[in-house]
Image: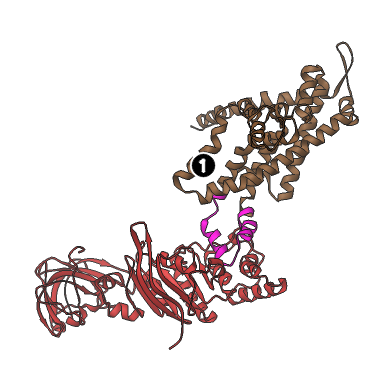
Amino acid sequence: MTSADLECLELSKHFGGFTAVDQVSFSVPSGSFFSILGPSGCGKTTIMRMVAGFLEPSSGDIKIKGKSVLDVPPNKRPVNMVFQHLALFPMMNIADNIGYGLRRQGLAKSDIERKVDEALERIGLPGIGKRKVDELSGGQKQRVAIARCMVLQPDVLLLDEPLGALDLKLREHMKIELKALQAAFDTTFVYITHDQSEALVMSDQIAVMNKGRFEQVGSGRDLYYRPETAFVAGFVGESNRWRGKVTRAEAGALQLTTDAGLIMTGIDHGRSLAVGSQAQIFVRPEAIRVSRSGDDLAHFENRMVGKVQSLLFNGAASRAILRSAANGDDIEVSLPQSGEYADLQRGDDLYFGWAGEQANAFAAPLENA
Amino acid sequence: MRAGAKLGLFLLLTPLLLWLGLLIIIPHIDMFLVSIRERIGVGQYQTSPANYLTFLTEPLYLVTFMRTAFMSILATLLTLVIGFPVAFYIAKIAKGRLQSALFLLCLVPFWVSELVRTFGWMILLRETGIFSNLLQWLGLVDGPVEMLYNDVAMIVGLVYTSMLFMVVPLVTTIESLDDSIIEAGYDLGGSNLSILREIVIPHAMPGIASGSIVVFMLSLGNYLTPTMLGGKDSLWFTELIYSQFIVRFNWELGAAFGFMLLILSSLIVWAMLKLTGQTLEKTMT
């Protein structure tokens, strides 16, 4: 067990009557990539600003390498932050940007120059020190912003949705690069984002946050395949969802009747839903098998037939929306890319089905559907 | 359509061209012509640099000229030093209604004329004024104190008069500095002072330059404040110009003085821009 670089203990922040962060506790092991994933307004930026020192927590404690930093002002904390819009200093050239923190530490000029050169080397942009900030591309700025923090060798690097402003191709590329940079610098990264794919691709651990609380902390795989709450199931990845009533429950295996009258089986992963209670059921599109003949799907508990309502071509992630013949529900399914369905047309009939263990059922809160 | 657009452009430009031509270019050309002629008899003139030579050889003129320049620079610097924190507070620290209220407060004194504002200072500073009475009442001085008619009173008046013209461009430029850039400065270990020096001031430089230029020009060309608050002991160059034109009726020398003032202000503004590494285009945006 490695020691925790960053620990938050029952951290809360209230703005007037509004609770932005509510009793959040987590610890980030040394050298890991930790993401906080949540919709905008969930309080993730507030957590980050408290860790950086720009906001004072209403209660709770923040520890870095085991020491509380609540009394440490932001310019003395051993954490650095990559801002959402990077916040490179436009009045300085690249070398001065990277050297800013080192100058504040009072290093000798020759040392600063050497360290800046090393950092530029490391981010793969040697020799650009004399350039101006606005002469760089988005990806280069990104790397400079990280280098500017990393030369200070912080215990924790905070990243506040730094990829938000980049175009899609570059963002995909930067995901891989950020992960590589984290490995190269061997520093603890805390990354906040609303983009699940960024979190899933890069993180060792992800905390899914909603309304000021952590819903679940775990690896990307855990969150995706074994979501613990309905919010996580709905937020991470795509899902078909139904609301219904539990009509039979046997050792975790449930039979549910949706509001539209569809009967399906699902499992509750130990959340013990009682007969008669309201439930939400989530089924991932890729968990649904499609076929042109009903026989192939005989081993699935849930079987249906439907008409292709629309085809969503998206390369390898192509989907189809099928309208169930039974009750007119629209269900999204993944299409296998083996070419078998290349000639699928709108209005075609398809059989589809899924195993009961792929349908995740959660107790439904009464207020939000 | 194209002809219509051209006509529109022409109509739009007309007021500007009229203004430039009638009020700036033609009078200046005429002024220059007046300044280089010398009166040799009744209604008889010849072209000569005599007026400029008079200016250069008469110590009073030269001393007043240099003093005016120096005092204007001093007033500009003081306005900057006082205005910068005010502007920073309005732009970055005050939020919402307080921000607009403070900005309005800067503006309110300009709702009354400069004459009335200057009288306000006279009420405060004169021998029988409020400050003098207050000091006597506190027992700090024995008799009435005259605080008017000296350089300090005049500088106070100049700074007060030009404060708005410094604060407005500063607020605009400081406001355009992204908060996260200041935060990034703190995050990377910067102290208040280093952030001010390396981030805020370089960013605000166009505002500092344009504010300083305006304040300097206003001070240099100010007539009312030096006359009313500075009195006879603090002679201002504009007063010399006035006396040449109006009192002495020596338009030739007055015009030469006017031209010297124009050259001086252009030189100092140019030097200021060079010193701060700004260009005129940058400060005007």
Question: In the picture, which chain is brown?
Answer: B
Left or right of A24 in this view: A55 = right
Q: Nearer the viewer, residue A125 or B146?
A: B146
Q: Which residue is mark 1?
A: B102
Name the kind of residue labelled 1 in the image: Leu
Left or right of B105 in this view: B132 = right
What segment is highlighted magenta in the picture? B174-201
Residue displayed at 78% across by 19% down: B245
Q: Chain of mark 1?
A: B
In this view of the protein, can residue A25 be seen by the observer? yes
Q: Position of residue A169 (x, y in %)?
A: 45, 68
Q: Position of residue B250 (x, y in %)?
A: 82, 18
Placement of A295 over or under B239, stated as above or below: below
By what rule are the colours in the image chosen? by chain
Q: Quadrant of the C terminus of chain B?
A: top right
Q: Nearer the viewer, residue A160 or A94?
A: A160
Q: Nearer the viewer, residue B257 or B62?
A: B62
